[in-house]
Image: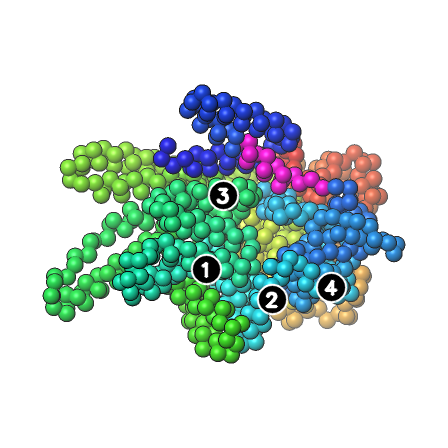
Amino acid sequence: MTRPIVPLLIALMAGIIVGSCCHIPDLISQISLAIVLLFVLIALRLQWRRSFILLVLLSFVIIGNSSIGMDERPRYGKDHLLHRICDGKITGEGIISENPRISPERTELVVTVNRILSNGQYIPASGRVLLRVRDGSDLGYGDFIRFHSRLREPRNFQNPGGFDYERYLRLRRILVTGSINDPSGIVLLRKKQGRRLIMRMESFRDRIREALREKAPEEEGRIIQAMTLGEKREIPRDIIENFNKTGTSHLIAISGLHVGIVAFVCLLLVRRIFGISEYLLLRWNVEKIAAVVAMLTVLFYMFVAGAGISVIRATIMVLTFMTAVIFNRDRDLYQALALAAFLILLISPGSLFDISFQLSFSAVLSIVFLTPRLASLLPAISPSPPGGAKEYFLLTLLKKWLHGVGIFGFVTLSATLGTLPLMLFYFNRLSTVGLVANLAVVPLLGLVATPLFLLTVIAIPIFGNLAAPLLDLSVCLVKMVLLLIRHFAAPPYSAIFLPTPTLLEMTAFYLLLIALGFILDDWRQPMKDRPLAKQKRRLWFGVSTCIVMYFLINMLPFHLRGNSNTGLSLTAIDVGQGNAILVRFPGGGKMLVDGGGFYDESFDIGRSVVAPYLWHQRINRIETVVLTHSHPDHLQGLLFIVQHFGVRQVWTSGEVCDSPLYQKFLQITSSRGLTIDTINDSTPPMNIEGVSVQVLNPRSLWAQGNGILIPPLRRETGLSMEETRPHSKKRETGKRALDDCNDRSLVIKLTYRNRSFLLPADITSITENRLLQSGADLKSDVLLVPHHGSGYSSTEPFIRRVAPLLGIISCGRDNIHGLPHPEVMQRYRQIKTKIFRTDRDGAVTVETDGQELKLSTFKIPLR
């Protein structure tokens, strides 16, 4: 077997995947492994070669299965923090066990808790908790702290296509989280209680960090800090967005590229130094010495960068390649790459599901496979004749330089193609300028800046102010890069968002790359082998044609199916304590009613929750966006949708709001060339693709008694609504003002043949009573329960008039309001309405052909 590690790696990966999908008890796994290993020894003794190979592979399948099982389903004792999540706020003490993640909005601390203070007594405790602190920038690794917080289990937004945050934390051995907004909720008891080696390295990193903050400008210093210390959360959002647009974000997150560049520069320097002396070249094996120096430098860089999981993985990958050089195994790059992946997965099986692991190995594998084949297309460089004229020498030098640029371009192209499906799958973003931007920026910020930054951070603690010239040079280099990044990110279509590809589409794309690679191989065959090469080329050309036809025949109709519907469907997206409802009309049109959101802007629910769900459903355009009212839990998520999706029109109730969030909403709609249509109960019923859309609230009079009539379809085109503000008395504050806003919410009824849906947003009993008195037809089969199940809504007369068969409550799990209210739930039970909740069932979808109702939920599909 020429590459024995490859089948072992495949077996290990298969075991990890199986173990993540289905749980096998540890005892059964251990017994199975013992039996298989026993048969391995028997097969080895009896020289049953095939049986031996199969049994070894099976053993690694079991090892992968059991190892991921321990990460996916960690064991915890009776004193674990999980048993404290229902105890209200607790006071715990522990050590900060990871480097804090600092961002402008908050600091994330991972604390290993060892005791809890209760009634003046210490109680032993165990477990790791992720604390989100409003201001914790003065805390660091090894600090022993006391905190006061309510503990919660981490939760996912339960929608198709959503990020599995629970697994992400579980693989880091974090099973509980907490939030601290009051500075008094966290107290530093003792500093530097961590491991000595790590504490010394952290002291070194602190000196570098302080020097960068003191001597380097804010933006440039943060970039240098990200590329040396691995801390990029302090980089301003607009700069990170520019890097994302240009497809160069991998440059500011320490990865295999940076570690590989450090190793490459070390190899090059050692070779140059030894090349000065002929004696040294003859006396020592330069390649092996250079590999050892590169390994030591890479290890140093790993500790300077904070030894995070992704940095450790990149280091293992590079160390594996350097070891192959030392043992003269560097020619088989596939074997070295497989060995690196094998070692990483043995140490950390959960890495298989990590985005950085997948991107790193897909990029390197694509470079190894495609680059040599693409490089063969370049013309060979003919050497200049001996004693030739200076012109020949310069021409040869120019050809070598162009050849090097071509090779670098093919490396960039290979890495881009190799990671493209994964980038679309995880981030749904395609950078149209990515290839050109990488060609311009990677040489500066990668090949030149990374070694320079490392040299700078080494010089700062040793030479102090004497390192200033190096730091100034680094800052100038970063300024140049930022100018280039801004230039490439400036065009409006420098990056586009695309729907999520399916696994079948991703597989077809990679098969297409492989087929094209083999076609290039056949083109390089000598003339005498051309007949055979021609046959192979026909074979691979046929494979490529079949794959392209698959994309044309299967993929395009799939996208079209995403834009069509057999009936009317409504999905309550899980956005926590908020509302976001996707309506699909029979002809393929889509309406998004609200977008969810939080009262602070630290988390963009539109970008992180609503948009991934839409992309997963192959949706990139929304015909109508509806804002029922301006509260953040309905508005915030719409900002990203309006800005990045193909929106045709926006409906609101005409409410005037001075909040910064609403003003930002107006700015985005204006910049997109959209007008805002004001609708109310005087708006005539609309027919959209056979569905009757009727507006029941708010009243055409904006406020009772003010005598000002709002036209049915008033259009707001400016950034401010001051000119159209009614001259009425000042709006009340507090709860009454909130209720006023809720009672002015849009109430929409959708009717398709014999079935109807009622969307009452956050109206209270006041508006419910008005609707009852108005004689409006409220009877509906499906009701989006008003105000998330609040006790101030869903009055008994109202729900009896509506008489819904199905009720859907959009609310957050364990929300501070205690919604839905128990009395409200009892009212719906009395009229035998089946209630579904997004906090328990995830996204809830109801479909109808006008006769039958079909309901399904994300957690438990129903028929």
Secondary structure category for the residue under label 3: helix
Return the residue at label 4. 190
Q: Main secondary structure of the magenta part?
A: helix
**Mark 4 / mark 2, whichever is N-terminal:** 4
Q: Residue at x 44, y 48 (%)?
A: 320
Q: Give the Cα separation between the discs numbered 2 and 3.
A: 30 Å
Asked if labels 1 and 4 touch by Cβ distance under 8 angstroms, the answer is: no
Query: Badge 4, how many Cα within 10 Å: few under 14, some, many 20+?
Result: few
Q: Residue at x 32, y 49 (%)?
A: 371
- Would you place residue 806 above or below residue 453 in this image? above
Amino acid beneath label 4? Arg
Secondary structure category for the residue under label 4: strand
Q: Quadrant of the N terminus?
A: top left
Amino acid beneath label 1? Thr
Residue 769 visible in the picture: no
Q: Give the Cα separation between the discs numbered 3 and 4.
A: 37 Å
Asked if labels 2 and 4 touch by Cβ distance under 8 angstroms, the answer is: no
Q: Give the Cα separation between the discs numbered 4 and 1.
A: 33 Å
Amino acid beneath label 3? Leu
**Mark 4 / mark 1, whichever is N-terminal:** 4
Secondary structure category for the residue under label 2: helix
**Mark 2 / mark 1, whichever is N-terminal:** 2
Return the residue at label 1. 297
Q: Percent position (x, y) of residue 564?
A: 51, 40
Q: Give the Cα separation between the discs numbered 2 and 1.
A: 19 Å
Q: Percent position (x, y) of residue 422?
A: 47, 47
Q: Give the Cα separation between the discs numbered 4 and 2.
A: 16 Å
Q: Percent position (x, y) of residue 775?
A: 77, 46
Query: Badge 2, how many Cα within 10 Å: few under 14, some, many 20+?
Result: few
Return the residue at label 2. 203
